[in-house]
Image: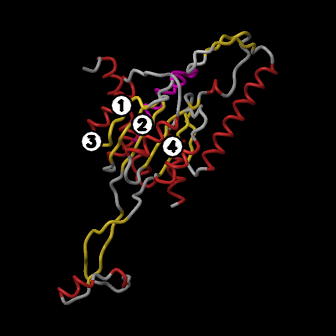
């Protein structure tokens, strides 16, 4: 039984995201994630201008006329959502946590996918695969995924992206769309990511909070690492300390961006203090322009 408060949250999210899908994302998703192949649809009589290589000689011989094969884009696809539920996801300095942002983006993508007659699956991961939901179609299935995103009780606070990526390689037998929703505050996952990107259409959706990029002059501040539990006190009263923090954040972000470009993975930053609609639309349109 879903608690009443959680049910109300999921219902509000369904209404909002389905509205976005109907008005904005449905067509953009279709264009950005077109089928990867062509499948046979039918035969029809030859018309002037048709490619002679498409002639179906067997059908033509049986019917005493010339017929050509018609192919259409392979439409049904599988979308796998890899969602980071480690401790850093329960952080947010601007009104919502990264985990909440991930849930809403997953809902938008999932409703877009089922509108396009695609299957959607889910992997929740920390430093282990905490939950795997095999890909299926339908509204009830998407609502189940959204419920899991909100209701799952995390077993570990640490992150290991390579675990989730290797799991995706194991469970996806055909080329799929793999969307990774994480802050990418991890290391040692390049080889696994490269392997996934070679086999699947892979997109990195990086969740970012403004406090991870810059901090105000707050004076002495007690900090706790959400993943390791390590505590430390920092003095943010001086410009030097804050500049060092911002420099480290920029360096880390540049390194993440370089890695994703190196393994040819599309990358979009989604911020907890900003609307995600425009960045997602720009991502979908840039993919469509490259096709």
Residue at point 64% right, 12% down? 231
| Most common secondary structure along the magenta stretch | helix
Of badges 4 and 2, nearer the viewer stands: 2
Q: Earlier in the sequence, mark 4 or mark 1?
A: 1
- In the image, 208 versus 134, the foreground residue is 134
- 157 lies left or right of 216: left
Is the N terminus in the top left, top right, bottom left or bottom right quadrant?
top left
Q: Position of residue 101 (x, y in %)?
A: 48, 30
Q: Position of residue 124 (x, y in %)?
A: 42, 32
Q: Helix, strand or loop at disc 2?
A: helix
Residue at point 26% right, 35% down? 140
Q: Helix, strand or loop at disc 1?
A: helix
Q: Helix, strand or loop at disc 3?
A: loop
In space, the residues marked 2 and 1 are separated at their CA atoms by: 8 Å
Q: Earlier in the sequence, mark 1 or mark 3?
A: 3
> Would you say the residues marked 2 and 1 are in contact, meaning their CB atoms lie under 8 Å apart?
yes
């Amino acid at each position: 039984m879903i608690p009443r408060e959680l049910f109300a949250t999921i219902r509000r999210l369904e209404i909002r995201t389905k509205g976005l899908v109907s008005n904005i994302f449905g067509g953009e998703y279709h264009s950005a994630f077109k089928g990867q192949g062509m499948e046979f649809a039918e035969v029809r009589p030859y018309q002037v201008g048709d490619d002679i290589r498409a002639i179906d000689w067997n059908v033509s011989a049986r019917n005493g006329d010339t017929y050509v094969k018609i192919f259409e884009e392979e439409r049904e696809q599988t979308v796998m959502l890899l969602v980071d539920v480690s401790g850093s996801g329960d952080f947010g300095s601007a009104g919502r946590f990264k985990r909440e942002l991930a849930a809403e983006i997953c809902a938008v993508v999932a409703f877009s996918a089922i509108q396009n007659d695609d299957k959607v699956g889910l992997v929740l991961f920390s430093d282990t695969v905490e939950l795997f939901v095999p890909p299926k179609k339908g509204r009830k299935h998407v609502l189940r995924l959204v419920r899991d995103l909100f209701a799952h009780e995390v077993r570990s606070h640490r992150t290991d992206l390579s675990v989730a990526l290797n799991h995706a390689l194991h469970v996806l037998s055909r080329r799929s769309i793999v969307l990774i929703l994480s802050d990418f505050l991890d290391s040692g996952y390049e080889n696994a990511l490269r392997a996934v990107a070679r086999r699947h259409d892979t997109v990195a959706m990086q969740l970012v909070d403004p406090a991870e990029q810059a901090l105000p002059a707050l004076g002495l501040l007690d900090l706790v690492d959400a993943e390791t539990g390590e505590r430390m006190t920092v003095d943010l009263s001086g410009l030097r300390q804050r500049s060092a923090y911002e420099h480290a954040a920029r360096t880390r972000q540049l390194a993440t961006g370089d890695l994703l470009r190196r393994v040819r993975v599309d990358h979009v930053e989604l911020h907890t203090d900003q609307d995600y609609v425009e960045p997602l639309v720009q991502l979908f349109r840039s993919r469509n322009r490259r096709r």
